[in-house]
């Protein structure tokens, strides 16, 4: 059969056409799939790119916050106080520098951060807790907390917000990230408490006695009150060891100490009996199950060794070890915290200080030397012995060189040291011998300081030699006659106002030091034992001096300063008295390897004290005109001037009249300041004695039997670090005098003594060893005491140089929205 070629062709054409359609459909579908895939890839790339840019912005924002955290660390180490309010801004004045912004957003390479976009803002600090807070290590929530089971701390926090933007190169738009960071500051310091003792603390007051603020001791508490009266604790009472409801000296409540003891069980400082619960004599650490009793009755406001507590030892120092008076052949005492008030010491056993001519061996390592008040001072007054009997002890002003000379000395910027471990002296001024521009006028170039500076220094800091009217104990006198006045002489060819000839400046004779009452003799006088040369510091004149820039300029109009308070004054003034010779009992305190006799000595170098056997005086600081503290009014650096003032000496300190207070009984209280001009203040010394605001007070009559009267109201506002002569059970009539006699007196008080601050007993006395003899104290009668815990300290506003174990912790980090960022960081609640 014949095939139709046309049909075949048509059939093939149809098949080929169908195949082509199929191919085209498949190709189109493939193209669609490829297009969709490519589009998906493109979207995914955009998403990945944007995510990468978003992550870059977040990392930049976190970096900005870390700059703020680093600045917090720096300020936390350099400045004990963050500001002059209850809720200061701890980052006040801080901003990222151009270099910092350039580092985060350099605008080069693959970095997309917009340098001008980075910002930071922060809240103020949260309020301080009502009481120091202990981090409970038994709580699983705190398992990884490095602060658990430590001494209670003051804990505050703040919030930081940061933002940063990156530029999307594809869309030329900014992508911004916002983050929030919570930062916590934890402070462990002795001034977290109204009273901190490194040893047994004793409350044995006869009259009613109220403690406004928390109490902590590294040892035992002994608590009693006078018959029919009350001892009240309005906050926490914590003993690392035990709490006893009897007198340490008697071992019971005899001798008129059968009164009641009341302790708070909730926050606040209420004196109402309804807010306190009594502690019976049977309800102390001797009671079985005392922990449960204390937790239930006082809501953990009372704690002893049965609670998870940690000793709070001074930073960088070994623990205090008391002397055991039951042993007579072994010396257990390790008075380690005393190094806080030591001068800077040398590593060499044979080193002699070029100014004083005294061996100054006793270096204890850089970390410890840097934490001494002497190492934190930018104003050291170094005193040397008088050249002759009747001549004043001379002194010079020295300042040390900071490691970073662009900033003041601080715990974060310690002094630079020489090969002997001693700080390098950056400036040295001797107002007694330095040639001035009056003695050597131009065109001479011999002058070191201006005559005006010499005048100001010798007026503000007057050196007074000891002398009395007796002659039975060599040429100094006998320590039982009236003291002899001294009139400082002006420098040769002097102009300006110097202490006028004939002005009566008196030395000090401390009758407590010169008096003894033993079981055998009852009442004896120790002539010359309380005799002291005096360095009389007028706070008003010193304040004027440090704020007068022109006085400190080099002579002849030369550029620069002999001392520049604006960059060197740290708020800490340290008075260094001559050291006791490194022989005998002093040398015995050094380990055998150092030439001493003790296997584990504390290496303490005390100042020279008055010596009855040698008939030689000791040395003392007398603070006068101290209603207003020396405080710099202006400064050239970011976070200065230092907030407040600290006076420290390695000898005794006497305060005459009101201190950092207006002296008006109608202003302020035992806890609150008189006004906003009041500053955080600290006094640290071997012993602190308060002399009343009695303008007629006569130092001339101090050695006589009749004590001066103290009729005036006297007001003190300062934290105090001092020592005690510890209670010696069974040995004579010696006891520490208790908290109420910690600050010493030398008058017959019939006025009120108002004290607000904090009391810290860290060591035993090394210079002022006159004991408090129960029932035999003819050198004074006590004032009406009104004592409390200063609001500044409760707020974490500490004086310059305050030793602090401080940690800065980032608690969390989270992303926030633009709306939250724009609203600004809120202040966290108080940590309780």
Image (spheres, rainbow, N blue to C red):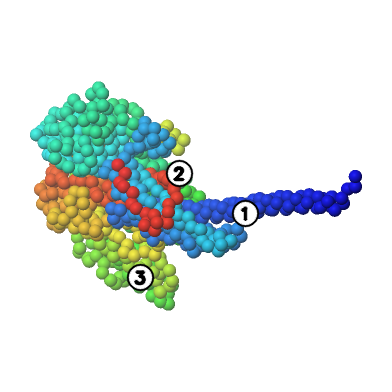
- The answer to whether residue 366 of the structure is visible from this angle is yes
Which element is circle 3 on? helix
Mark with earlier residue (1, 2): 1
- Mark 2 — residue? 365
Name the outermost residue toward the top. Answer: 288
CA–CA distance in space, label 3 to label 2: 38 Å
Task: Give the camera-side residue of 300 and 574.
Answer: 300
Instruction: Give me the residue at 34% from left, 65% from top.
Output: 634
Name the outermost residue toward the bottom. Answer: 443
User: Where is residue 703 drawn, in percent x and y?
Assistant: 17, 48
Callout 1: 10 Å neighbours few (<14), some, many (20+)? few
CA–CA distance in space, label 1 to label 3: 76 Å
Q: Quadrant of residue 731?
A: top left
Which element is circle 1 on? helix
Q: Which mark is residue 39?
A: 1
Mark with earlier residue (1, 3): 1
Locate the N terminus and report the quarter of the image it occupies.
top right
Instruction: Tell whether label 3 touches label 1 (CB within 8 Å).
Output: no
- Mark 3 — residue? 550
Task: Give the camera-side residue of 202 and 149.
Answer: 149
User: Where is residue 772 drawn, in percent x and y?
Assistant: 20, 38
Instruction: Give me the residue at 12% from left, 35% from top.
Output: 226
Callout 3: 10 Å neighbours few (<14), some, many (20+)? few
CA–CA distance in space, label 1 to label 2: 69 Å
* 430 sits left or right of 519 in the view: right
């Amino acid at each position: 059969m014949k095939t139709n070629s046309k049909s075949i062709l048509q059939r093939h054409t149809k098949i080929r056409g169908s195949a082509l359609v199929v191919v085209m459909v498949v190709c189109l579908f493939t193209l669609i799939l490829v297009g969709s895939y490519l589009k998906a890839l493109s979207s995914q790339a955009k998403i990945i790119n944007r995510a990468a840019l978003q992550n870059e912005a977040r990392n930049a924002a976190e970096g900005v916050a870390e700059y703020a955290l680093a600045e917090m660390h720096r300020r936390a180490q350099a400045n004990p106080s963050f500001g002059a309010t209850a809720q200061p801004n701890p980052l006040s004045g801080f901003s990222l520098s151009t270099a910092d912004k350039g580092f985060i957003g350099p605008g080069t390479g693959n970095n997309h951060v917009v340098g001008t976009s980075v910002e930071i803002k922060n809240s103020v600090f949260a309020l301080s807790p009502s009481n120091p807070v202990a981090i409970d290590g038994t709580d699983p929530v705190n398992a990884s907390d490095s602060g658990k089971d430590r001494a209670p701390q003051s804990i505050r926090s703040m919030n930081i917000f940061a933002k940063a933007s990156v530029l999307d190169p594809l869309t030329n738009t900014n992508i911004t990230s916002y983050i929030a960071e919570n930062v916590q500051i934890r402070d462990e310091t002795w001034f977290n408490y109204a009273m901190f003792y490194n040893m047994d603390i004793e409350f044995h007051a006869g009259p009613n006695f109220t403690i406004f603020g928390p109490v902590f001791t590294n040892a035992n508490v002994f608590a009693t009150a006078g018959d029919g009266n009350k001892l009240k604790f309005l906050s926490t009472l914590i003993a690392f060891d035990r709490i006893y409801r009897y007198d340490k000296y008697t071992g019971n409540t005899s001798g008129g100490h059968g009164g009641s003891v009341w302790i708070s069980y909730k926050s606040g400082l209420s004196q109402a009996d309804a807010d306190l619960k009594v502690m019976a004599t049977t309800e102390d650490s001797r009671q079985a199950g005392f922990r449960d009793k204390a937790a239930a009755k006082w809501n953990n406001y009372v704690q002893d060794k049965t609670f998870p507590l940690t000793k709070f030892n001074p930073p960088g120092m070994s623990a205090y070890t008391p002397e055991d008076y039951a042993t007579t052949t072994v010396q257990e005492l390790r008075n380690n915290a005393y190094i806080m008030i030591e001068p800077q010491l040398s590593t060499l056993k044979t080193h002699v200080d070029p100014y004083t001519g005294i061996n100054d061996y006793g270096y204890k390592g850089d970390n410890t030397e840097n934490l001494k008040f002497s190492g934190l001072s930018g104003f050291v007054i170094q005193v040397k012995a008088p050249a002759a009997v009747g001549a004043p002890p001379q002194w010079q002003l020295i300042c040390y060189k900071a490691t970073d000379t662009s900033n003041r000395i601080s715990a974060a910027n310690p002094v630079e040291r020489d090969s002997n471990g001693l700080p390098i002296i950056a400036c040295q001024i001797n107002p007694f011998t330095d040639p001035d521009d009056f003695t050597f006028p131009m065109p001479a170039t011999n002058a070191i300081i201006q005559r005006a500076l010499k005048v100001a220094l010798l007026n503000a800091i007057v050196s007074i030699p000891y002398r009395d009217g007796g002659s039975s104990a060599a040429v100094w006198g006998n320590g039982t006659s009236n003291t002899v006045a001294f009139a400082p002489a002006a420098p040769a060819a002097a102009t300006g106002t110097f202490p006028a000839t004939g002005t009566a400046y008196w030395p000090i004779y401390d009758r407590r030091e010169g008096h003894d009452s033993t079981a055998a003799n009852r009442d004896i006088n120790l002539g010359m034992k309380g005799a002291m040369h005096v360095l009389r510091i007028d706070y008003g004149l010193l304040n004027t001096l440090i704020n007068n820039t022109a006085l400190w300029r080099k002579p002849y109009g030369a550029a620069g300063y002999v001392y520049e308070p604006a960059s060197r004054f740290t708020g800490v003034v340290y008075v260094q008295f001559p050291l006791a010779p490194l022989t005998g009992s002093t040398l015995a305190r050094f380990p055998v390897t150092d030439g001493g006799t003790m296997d584990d000595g504390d290496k303490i170098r005390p100042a020279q004290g008055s010596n009855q056997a040698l008939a030689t005086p000791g040395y003392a600081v007398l603070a006068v005109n101290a209603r207003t503290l020396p405080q710099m009014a202006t400064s050239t650096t970011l976070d200065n001037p230092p907030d407040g003032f600290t006076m420290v000496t390695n000898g005794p300190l006497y305060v005459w009249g009101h201190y950092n207070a207006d002296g008006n009984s109608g202003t302020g209280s035992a806890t609150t300041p008189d006004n906003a001009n009041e500053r955080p203040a600290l006094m640290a010394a071997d012993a602190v004695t308060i002399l009343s605001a009695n303008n007629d007070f006569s130092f001339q009559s101090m050695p006589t039997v009749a004590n001066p009267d103290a009729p005036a109201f006297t007001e003190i506002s300062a934290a105090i670090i001092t020592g005690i002569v510890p209670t010696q059970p069974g040995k004579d009539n010696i006891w520490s005098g208790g908290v109420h006699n910690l600050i010493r007196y030398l008058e017959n008080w019939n006025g009120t003594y108002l004290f607000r601050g904090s009391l810290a007993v860290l060591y035993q006395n090394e210079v002022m060893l006159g004991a408090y003899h129960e029932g035999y104290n003819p050198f004074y009668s006590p004032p009406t005491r009104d004592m409390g815990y200063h609001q500044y300290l409760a707020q974490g506003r500490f004086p310059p140089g305050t030793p602090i174990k401080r940690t800065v912790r980032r608690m969390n980090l989270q992303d926030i929205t633009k709306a939250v960022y724009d609203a600004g960081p809120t202040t966290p609640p108080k940590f309780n």
